[in-house]
Amino acid sequence: MEKRKLNFESYGEVTQEIESLERSGYEIKGKWTLGQACAHLDYYYKGSLDGFEHMFPWIVRFLLGKPALWWYLRVRDKEGNPTAPHSVPAEDVDDQKAIADIKDSLRRLATADKLHPSGLFGELTLVKWKEMHLGHAAHHLGFLVPKA
């Protein structure tokens, strides 16, 4: 079985997918459990909601942010793309806590009227943030295949 192709149109759909995987159980086709995937995604969700601890210098965001965003949006579905080391989840992540945390962040994202700048891409519109967040979730949750 290969990675699933997912396409989310709302934060609620991401929540539904997480809950479905939690209920049915799943096979791992990548490296991370559901809890690890949720912890990784939630790092970026919380960063956009509350601000990122790690920000590239403004000159890097200014010069490289838009080209890096363009590249990211075109290759995000490829396996093995680099990620920030501080966003990689621990192997012993508490699945229930990670799932509860991401569900809270997804609720907050659905009603947010402003989000913080990306640590690399800089200022983004709500629409662009949503595109990035939903695509990122589709990528990582696609490695978890529900059990029949």
Image (tube, grey):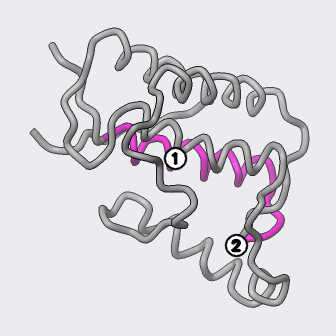
Q: Which residue is located at x 42 percent, y 68 percent?
A: 75
**Would you name the residue on which mark 2 appears?**
120
Q: Is residue 133 magenta?
A: yes
Q: Residues within 10 Å of mark 1 (few under 14, many from 20)?
A: many
Q: Amino acid at mark 2?
A: Leu
Q: Which residues are magenta?
A: 121-142
**For residue 117, what is the image quadrant?**
bottom right
Percent position of residue 51, x then y: 83, 53
Cα distance in 3D space between marks 1 and 2: 17 Å
Q: Is residue 131 above or below residue 120?
A: above
**What type of secondary structure mainly makes up the magenta span?**
helix
Q: Is residue 135 above or below residue 94?
A: below
User: Which badge, 1 or 2, is on the more N-terminal residue?
Assistant: 1
**Would you name the residue on which mark 1 appears?**
40
User: Is residue 130 left or right of 137 when viewed as pictured?
Assistant: right
Percent position of residue 70, x then y: 58, 74
